[in-house]
Amino acid sequence: MTATDARSVPAATLSVAYSSRATEDFSDSDLVELLTLSRRNNIRLGLTGVLLYRGGRFLQYLEGPEQAVAERIEIIAADTRHDDFQIRFRGSVGGLAGGVLGTALRPGGSGLLGAILGGAAGAAGGQAIDRSNGNNVRCR
C-alpha cells in the first residue's frame, strides 16, 4: 500500500453518548461560551455532535474519527464543570443527520427534551442554538 492509498482509507468512526451533572449553574452566556469553544474544537478534529442541557444536566452525542472522539471524551470527562459522568452509548453508528456541528438546547418549558428526541421539536417552548450555521432558533 502506498502513502496515497493509506490516506484514502477512512479512519474508523466512533460514536459516544454521555450524560453528566453540572457542578454549577450554566447561564445562557456560559452555554454560548462552551458552544463556541466546542464548535472550534469539533471542526478542528472532524467531529460532529449534539449537546443538550436541561435542569443542570448534560447529554452529549459525539461522532467522528475513533482516536479524536476517544481523546475528546477523556478531556470532557476530566472537566470539573460537571460530574456524574456516565457513558450511555459507545459504538460505531455514524452519520449524524445533517452533519450538525454541535447543537445545544436551552429548554424553556417542560417536555422539550422529550419532544425533540421524539421528533416533535416545535411541540414545546425553548431555545435551540444550531451550531452548524450559527443561528439561534426559537422553538414554540
Image (spheres, helix red, strand yellow):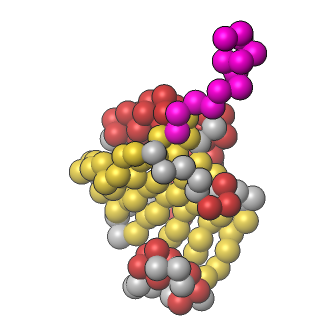
- Would you say 65 lies left or right of 2 here? left
* Up/down of 37 relative to 75, above or below: below
> Is 30 in front, or is 54?
54
- Would you say 62 lies left or right of 20 here? right
Residue located at (47% from left, 40% from top): 14
Residue 112 appears in the rendering: no
Residue located at (40% from left, 45% from top): 91
Residue 42: quadrant of the picture: top right
* Up/down of 50 relative to 92, above or below: below
Identify the magenta region: 1-13
Name the spot of residue 48 as percent of width and height, x first: 59, 48
The total number of labels drawn is 0
Name the spot of residue 66 as percent of width and height, x first: 49, 33
Asked if the stretch drawn in magenta spans residue 50, the answer is no
Residue 116 appears in the rendering: yes
Name the spot of residue 29 as percent of width and height, x first: 56, 59
Split into 4 quadrants, where in the image is the C terminus? bottom right
Residue located at (44% from left, 55% from top): 60
Split into 4 quadrants, where in the image is the N terminus? top right
Name the spot of residue 134 as percent of width and height, x first: 72, 59
* Up/down of 57 relative to 116, above or below: above
